[in-house]
Image: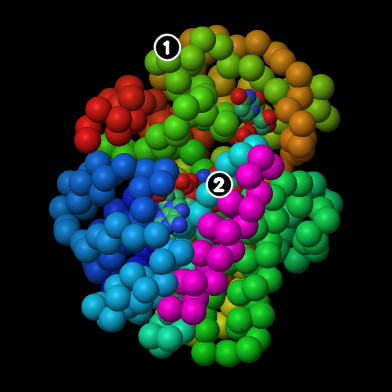
């Protein structure tokens, strides 16, 4: 069965492609390398020991995308391609709306024109906005006013758009996957997260402090109503997240229509829990200071992952120590990410 993976050279996409290839799926990757490197694809091949087709293509380019569907018999699409930096989305919102929303429209139009109506979409816990209750369940209401940034709004708008698409044509099968905080790397240390410039997210920041590329982690606030005052999140190992996509394909194969699922562990860790775990597991010291809160941050965010367990038959397996160990293994083996490889 052939699966088209948009954004398959990226962080979550590359890990998902490894799992798909391992499970015997044929994989066709589409990426424009906006936020990724060709070396990631060479490594996906090396880890999995299997080849796949790759097209360097922008998903906004309907004609090129259409040719890919003409040339291949595609059963389902996993759609990762998009921009994801929250801060940047506030600076250049139209760029985000165009790439994320128009990109998804173009993709779905091309899919429909080729009779391919099975889609797994990368959504985000950010669609919940400030949580009404903890843990967050899929029945929690979401509304556009509650989402705190343009990036998050693109995700919510796409979710709503895909619901309308399904209402208009019940032949579609669509899994909307709301990821919590993906971290970690493949246990081989050959692929992992390779952010451009100074990382926005906690885990890559910690590992760059550990390797000496950054001097000090600033902990954004220690006066939140949490066990140690620092922000609490639902960190999920990227390989578990990748397995969630394989599970979603199985669900789609049963022709279940459209539904949405939290992909998280259901466990919340604070910033200082992560720092301490990283230090303990890896035998390193993280230089940090307590700084001010980051505007827009919430105190606590973690999932109730029961629905994914019951309906997708999926559950995260890896704990925080493995997340810290695998991040550090990747960082140590690739101090400059994929940079010197191409
Ligand atoms: P990433 O930036 O590493 O991967 C995205 C990939 O898509 C990149 O390889 C990029 O080059 C490609 N891409 C972007 N626009 C494209 C276009 N127009 N045409 C073709 N390729 C394009 O990001 P990631 O962390 O792997 O995230 C994957 C998806 O999951 C994104 O949609 C993101 O919004 C979503 N998501 C990520 C997180 C997270 O914390 N990483 C959390 C929730 C949701
Ligand atoms: C985690 C915790 C920070 C950096 C973001 C997006 C979300 C989703 C995942 C895509 C918070 C603290 C961070 C630092 C710190 N992405 N922190 N010092 O904000 O939960 O979620 O990524 O969909 O949409 O918003 O993740 O890793 O930035 O922060 O203290 O240098 O670490 O305050 O408590 P966040 P994060």
Rendered position, 86 above or below 31: above
Please identify the quadrant where the N terminus is shown: bottom left
The image shows residue 70 at horizontal and vertical percentages of 28, 81
**Would you say residue 48 sits in the magenta stretch?**
no
The image shows residue 255 at horizontal and vertical percentages of 49, 85
Q: For disc 2, does the CB lie below 8 Å from ligand 1?
A: yes
Report the span colored magenta: 89-110
Rendered position, 271 above or below 141: above
The image shows residue 214 at horizontal and vertical percentages of 48, 14
**Could you tell whether 60 is left or right of 191 in the image?**
right
The residue tagged 1 is 212
Viewer-side residue, 312 vs 84: 84
Mark 1 closeness class: few <14, some 14–19, many ≥20 residues within 10 Å: few
Q: Earlier in the sequence, mark 1 or mark 2?
A: 2
The residue tagged 2 is 84
Distance CA(mark 1)–CA(mark 2):
26 Å
Question: Residue at (66%, 49%) from the top-left corner?
Answer: 93
**Could you tell whether 13 is left or right of 145 in the image?**
left
The disc placed on residue 251 is none
How many numbered markers are drawn?
A: 2
């Amino acid at each position: 069965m052939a699966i088209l993976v948009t954004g398959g050279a990226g962080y979550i996409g590359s890990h998902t492609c490894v799992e798909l290839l391992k499970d015997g799926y044929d994989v066709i990757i589409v990426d424009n390398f906006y936020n990724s490197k060709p070396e990631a694809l060479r490594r996906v091949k090396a880890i999995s020991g299997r080849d796949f087709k790759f097209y360097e293509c922008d998903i906004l380019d309907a004609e090129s995308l259409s040719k890919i569907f003409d040339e291949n018999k595609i059963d389902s699409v996993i759609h990762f391609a998009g921009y994801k930096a929250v801060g940047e989305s506030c600076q250049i919102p139209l760029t985000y709306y165009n790439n994320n929303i128009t990109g998804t429209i173009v993709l779905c139009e091309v899919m429909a024109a080729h009779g391919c109506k099975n889609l797994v979409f990368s959504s985000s816990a950010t669609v919940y906005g400030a949580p009404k209750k903890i843990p967050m369940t899929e029945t929690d209401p979401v509304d556009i006013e509650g989402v705190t940034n343009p990036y998050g709004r693109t995700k919510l708008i796409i979710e709503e758009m895909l619901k309308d698409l399904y209402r208009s044509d019940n032949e579609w099968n669509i899994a909307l996957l709301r990821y919590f905080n993906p971290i970690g790397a493949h246990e081989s240390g050959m692929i992992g997260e390779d952010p451009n410039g100074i990382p926005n997210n906690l885990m890559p920041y910690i590992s760059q402090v550990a390797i000496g590329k950054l001097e000090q982690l600033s902990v954004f606030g220690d006066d939140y109503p949490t066990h140690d005052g620092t922000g609490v999140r639902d960190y999920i190992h990227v390989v578990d997240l990748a397995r969630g996509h394989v599970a979603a394909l199985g669900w789609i194969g049963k022709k279940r229509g459209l539904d949405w699922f939290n992909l998280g562990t259901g466990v919340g860790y604070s910033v200082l829990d992560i720092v301490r775990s990283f230090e303990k597991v890896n035998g390193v010291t993280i230089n940090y200071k307590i700084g001010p809160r980051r505007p827009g941050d919430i105190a606590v965010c973690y999932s109730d992952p029961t629905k994914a367990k019951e309906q997708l038959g999926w559950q995260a397996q890896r704990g925080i120590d493995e997340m810290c160990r695998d991040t550090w293994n990747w960082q140590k083996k690739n101090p400059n990410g994929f940079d010197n490889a191409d």
